[in-house]
Image: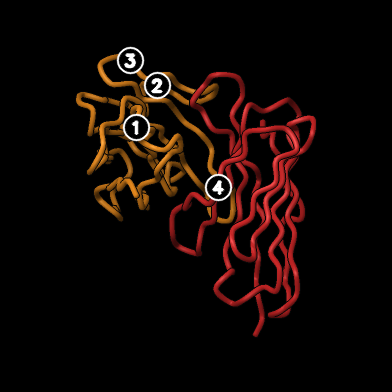
Chain colours: A orange, B red
Amino acid sequence: GAVVSQHPSRVICKSGTSVKIECRSLDFQATTMFWYRQFPKKSLMLMATSNEGSKATYEQGVEKDKFLINHASLTLSTLTVTSAHPEDSSFYICSAHGLAGVTDTQYFGPGTRLTVL
Amino acid sequence: GQQVMQIPQYQHVQEGEDFTTYCNSSTTLSNIQWYKQRPGGHPVFLIQLVKSGEVKKQKRLTFQFGEAKKNSSLHITATQTTDVGTYFCAGRKGNTDKLIFGTGTRLQVFP
């Protein structure tokens, strides 16, 4: 099946720093990628929809200036958590939706666990 | 807020017992997907249901989409310890690609 990678898998940073998370579709082109966050023992909450070549669409309550999304190519989307605070500590997961010819589903990356001290 | 609810939130079963999780949406869905997430892992796609009343089977797993396309269920027959994890339904509305995840049901299977 389709493969989506995320990097880094785990990051620990100090409060106030920015962290960039990469999401790559390895064997297919993804016009749309999605970013989720998941708190322990909770469900996945959609943060934003990332469209190649255009601005991301953010869900209600998600600060676009804090969570910067860039989808510069059909295989790469990045999420930058700016000026991270301890409450931003979470599991961030991306998913990619394939172009025609790929099963209509979302393929999830392995996730990035962010801990802000 | 969360518009797709799942019950139960958590269930313990003895190995060999059956298990069912129910998924309910406040609005009609164009399709519904089911995912399994192992502890520490990421969601893995299981199946997609599109048609009203659709039933699909994967070995010991049976998935059903309600007639009104607002609810769905996943039934596991004769659970095994490898079934442990959290099961999420995720629904799509209209033509959007966005998935709204359910609250999840965490399954624990005791040998």
**Mark 3 vs mark 1: in front:** 1
N-terminal label among 3 and 1: 3
Find numbered disc 1 in the image and state the secondary structure of the residue it sits on.
loop
Q: Position of residue A56 (x, y in %)?
A: 37, 19
Q: Chain of mark 3?
A: A
Question: Separation of disc 4 and disc 1 at Cα?
Answer: 17 Å
Question: Separation of disc 2 and disc 3 at Cα?
Answer: 10 Å
Q: Which residue is mark 4?
A: B47
Find numbered disc 4 in the image and state the secondary structure of the residue it sits on.
strand
Name the residue at 34% across, 50% down: A1
Q: Which residue is mark 2?
A: A64
Q: Which residue is mark 3?
A: A55
Disc 1 crowd, CA 10 A, few/some/many (<14, 14-19, 20+): few
Q: Position of residue A60 (x, y in %)?
A: 54, 21
Question: Separation of disc 4 and disc 2 at Cα?
Answer: 32 Å
Name the residue at 30% across, 38% down: A16
Task: Name the quadrant of the C terminus of chain B.
Answer: bottom right
Relative horizontal placement of residue B3, taking residue B34 as reference (left or right): right
**Mark 4 vs mark 3: in front:** 4
Q: Nearer the viewer, residue A96 or A7?
A: A96
The picture quadrant where one finds residue A98 is top left
* Label at residue A78: none
**Residues tagged 3 and 1 counted as in contact (Cβ below 8 A):** no
